Amino acid sequence: MAAVAAIPSGPVAGEIPTRTPVNRILTIAHRGAHQSVPEDTLPAIEKAVELGFDYVELDVRFTSDGVPVLMHDATVNRTTDGHGFVRDMTLAEIKRLDAAGAPEWRGSFRDLRVPTLEEALRVMKGRASAYVNQKDPPRPVEIQLLRKYGFYPGHAVVAGRNEQVLAFRELAPKADLLLNIRDIDDIPAVLASVPRLKGFTTRASIVTRELVEAAHADGVLVFTNALGPDDTASEMQRVIAAGVDAIQTNQPDVLLRLLGEMDKEWRSGNAQEVGRLPGRQGQ
C-alpha cells in the first residue's frame, strides 16, 4: 500500500515562500476521479488513489438515522435511481439505491451503492488524505470516524460553506480548516476572526499573484478550485504561475499531465524561480 504524501499537518506558521512556478502542487480529486465512474462512489475514490492524488474530496451528508454518507446534492435525484432528500432517508433506504442511476451511467455498473463515510475512509486509509466538503452541520460521529481511520488530526482538511467549517472546529479543535474567500479584500477580516487557519479556498478565476502573496504572508495556503469553465490546462497553468498550493479538478488527466510536464522542466533545470517571499522555507 502506498504511503500518504507528506502534507503539512496543522496550521502553517510564519510566512510561506511564494515560488513561481510552483514545484509541488497538492492535487485534489473533485468527488473522486469520476470521468469514467460515477461521482462520490468507491470506484471514483479508488481511481483517484490509483492516480496518485494527494486528496480525495468527500461530500459528507447525514441520513435520517445519523449516518454520514457521500452525496454532493441535498437530494439523491441526480445521481441515483431514487428521489428525496438524504436527510429524510435512512441508511437502509439509501443503500437500496443504484449509485449509477444517473442517465449517463445507467446499466454500466452492477450493484454500485452510495458509500458511507466509513467505507470511503477505509479505502483511503494510508493512501490519500481527505478533503472533507462539509455539506451538513458536522456531528461527533464524523470526527470519531476520521480519528478511527487516522485522518484526524493531520490527514484531512475541512471545506464547504464557512459556517459549516467553523462548526467543525467546535467539535474538533485540531481540525485543519479551509475558509472560502471571494477576493483579496476578504483576507484581513477572515484572518482577524479565525485563528489557526490552514488555508483559503478560492475560485481559480479570482487568483492573482497578489492574492497568493497576501495569504502566504500570514502563513495561509491557497487551495484553488479549477472547476467548471476554469477546469482547463491554461487556467491551471495560470494559477500555478501565481503560486497557489493546491488545485481541485474534475479533469485529473489534464492536471496530472500538466504537472508531469512541469516536473520534467524542473528536473532538467529549465524552470526558473521568478519570485519568493522572505520567511521560513516552504512546505
Image: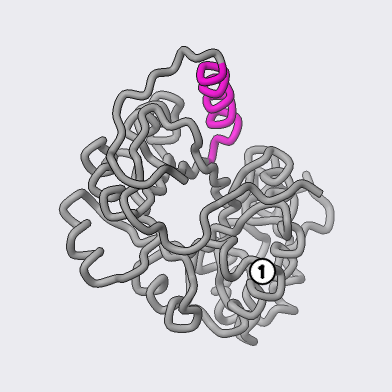
- 280 vs 62: above or below: above
Viewer-side residue, 249 vs 72: 249
**Colour mode of the rendering:** one colour
Q: Residue furthest left?
A: 185
Measured as percent of width and height from the top left, residue 198 is found at: 41, 60
Would residue 48 be counted in the magenta stretch?
no
166 horizontally vs 210: left or right:
right
Q: Residue at x 55, y 35 (%)?
A: 251
- 86 vs 158: above or below: below
Measured as percent of width and height from the top left, residue 129 is found at: 61, 56
Measured as percent of width and height from the top left, residue 221 is found at: 38, 50
The residue singled out by tag 1 in the image is: 117
Secondary element under disc 1, as helix, strand or loop, is helix
Q: Residue at x 76, y 46 (%)?
A: 2
Q: Residues within 10 Å of mark 1 (few under 14, many from 20)?
A: many
Magenta span dominant secondary structure = helix
Measured as percent of width and height from the top left, residue 77 is found at: 57, 62
Would residue 254 be counted in the magenta stretch?
yes
Viewer-side residue, 94 vs 169: 169
Q: Residue at x 70, y 62 (%)?
A: 120
Viewer-side residue, 77 vs 255: 255
- 177 vs 148: above or below: above
- 57 vs 266: above or below: below
* Magenta stretch, residue numbers: 250-267
Q: Residue at x 72, y 52 (%)?
A: 127
Question: What kind of residue is marked 1?
Answer: Leu
Q: Quadrant of residue 105?
A: top right
Tag count in the figure? 1
Viewer-side residue, 227 vs 184: 184
